[in-house]
Structures are given as C-alpha cells and as structure tokens.
Amino acid sequence: MPRYSYSAINTYLNCPRQFLLAYVDRREQPRTEAAAVGTEVHECVAEYVRHLVRAGLQTDLDYIASLGVSSDARGVLETFAGTHLFEPGDYLVEHRHQVRLAEDVDYSGVIDLLRDRGEELDITDYKSFWRALSQSEVESSLQLRGYALLAFDLFPDARRVNCRMDFVRLGVVREMTLEREDADAVRQELLRHVSAIEKAKEAGDFPARPGGHCDWCGGKGDCPALASGLEAITCAADAAALADEYIVLEARRREIQGLLKPYVTREGALARNGLVVGYHTSDGVSYDLPALVSVLERAGYGILDYVRPDATAIKKAAKADSALAEALTAIARDASKSTFAVRREAA
C-alpha cells in the first residue's frame, strides 16, 4: 500500500524527476550547510518545547543556556523564548500520525505541536527559514491543510483546527482555521496529487522541472535540464534547453539573495573583486502632494508634467466603487507592456 507525505507530494509538484530520484530510485540527496542549520534549529525548538510541556513551564531561559547548540540555534531559541509563553494544557510534540486517504493510500506526517482543547485544536508548524510567508501563502499551504486532516483523524470529536505557521527566527506567526467539513476537500486534493504520481509511475514519465529546489536534488550532475553548454540556438530543442537553464539560474539568484540578506544585515556588505554585495542607499526625497502642487503652481510649472497618479490606489478605489470604475474605464488608455521574465504558466 503506498504511503505518501507532504514532502513526497511537494517534491513531485516541484520536479517529477527529483521525486523519481529521491522516492523511487532512493538516490542520496545532498545535505547543504543551510539545511543542516535548519535541521538543528528545528530540533532545538522541538526539544525546548518538550521541556516546557514536561515541566509545565511557560518559558525557561536557563534551559536554553544549558543546551550545547550552535550560536545560530541559540539565537533562534532566545528569540523564540522571548516571543512565546506556553499555557498549561494537553500537548503533543513532534507527533507522527497517518490517515487512510483511500482504500489503498495512506498519508502520514509529523505535527510539530498540537494542543487539544476539546472541540477545538491548535497545531503549529515551526519554520526556521529567513522569509515569513504571506498570509495568502499560508492559507493555501497544502502542508498545513494536511496537518489539519491528521489532527481531525486523531481527535474525532474536534470540530475546528487552528493552524499556525511559526517563523521562529523572525518571531512571526501566521494563522488559518479549518472546520471539520473542510477535511474531505483536503483529502480529495491529496488524492488528486497521489493519483497523478501513480500515473507517472505507470508511464515512467518524470520530466525535469528546474527551479530553486535544484539545490536540494541529488541528480543535478546528470539532469537534462541543466548545463546545456549551448552558445547558440539552432532549433526549438536548443531554445527549450536554454530556457530550462535560465529558469534554474533565476531561481538560484533569488535563493542566493535570500541567504545573503540576513548575513549582510548583521555583518555588513561584502567587497568582492571590485564589487560590493549588500545594501546600497540611494539619495531620494518625497513631497507632501498638496504642498508640491502649490509650489509648482506658484513657480508657473504645469502640474501634470511633474505629478503622476498613484495607479495602485486608483485600482483599489475602483474595486470598491463601481461608478468610479465605470468612469475610469471611459478615460483609460492602454499602457500595457511586455517584459522578458520567468512567470508561472497560467492554469
């Protein structure tokens, strides 16, 4: 009987070939320094939470000081302790559970923290990376919804699950809530992904889909989507190969930038080969709009030559005012333009 986890499904959604290597061929995957630090931080937070739950404490800075952990993990724990107070209650920490999605499919996962409050449950997923996801990203998280499904199965009398994604480095928490009646939709969503994976297994169809996840893949050395070596495009296949490589480079650029930002924020810019990598401050000024209009008028300048409308604010106002939207449509001029970029394909 196949058993799936969020990690397996997410790997397939990111790149079917990476799923093939990691979950079918069982090829060893690389363990980067960033991943090792993330694992340590996650384990330290879990151990600290276990200690608080066992001892019935709200916080314990002395316990943090006693742990033999890296300075990075200790800093995260200190931030965590300063922003979290644990109320007494019934908790499960790092609890593994699996639920039957269908007659021949199981889904498993490890819930970082679950608090039983009778008809209402609180689950928390701790994240150790440096970027806090937006509220919309959290609300669409398949991982959190999968945890909620596990929680509903664990506690049949629960009617509601409050799901939290806790970014422990930043002291930021995002929340969403699922009702028991939402559980079947989550189950069906997971089954759709499982069905797609099982069909791919039958067909042996696992195309490479390059992106930021490539750094975590053990198949980079022989991936058909990487390192094309092409210097000119002679056919559609060459163009496709270079497009794949371009996607990888763009994703890697964003990932590197994300890793460097917290370092240069803390330690300062890096001078490398005549170039400076870090934050650069540019001179700029802003004006109070009514005062600016008054100054321009007194000086004899045309206001429209120097003042531009705030298109974002106008769009927002038009969404809330149908009469305004209609009037704006009558005077709107097409200002669309094309930009060379990588974007997600329209559904």
Image: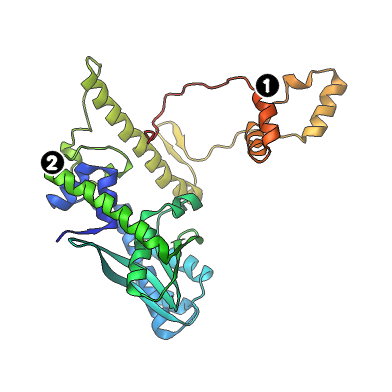
Q: Which residue type carries mark 2?
A: Ala
Q: Residue at x 54, y 37 (%)?
A: 280
Could you say which disc has been placed on residue 203 in the image?
Answer: 2
Q: Which residue type carries mark 1?
A: Ile
The image quarter containing residue 238 is top left
Query: Residue 113's spot in the image, x, y percent?
Result: 39, 71
Query: Residue 234's spot in the image, x, y percent?
Result: 22, 14
**From the image, which quarter does the C terminus lie in?**
top left
Q: Is residue 103 visible?
A: yes
Q: Which residue is mark 1?
A: 331
> Dot 1 lies on which element?
helix
> Measured along the vertical axis of the image, is residue 153 above or below residue 255?
below
> Dot 2 lies on which element?
helix
Front position in the image: 189 or 144: 189
- Left or right, 271 with reference to 192: right
* Residue extending farthest bottom: 55
Q: Is residue 27 visible?
A: no
Front position in the image: 267 or 13: 13
Q: Which mark is first along the chain, 2 or 1?
A: 2
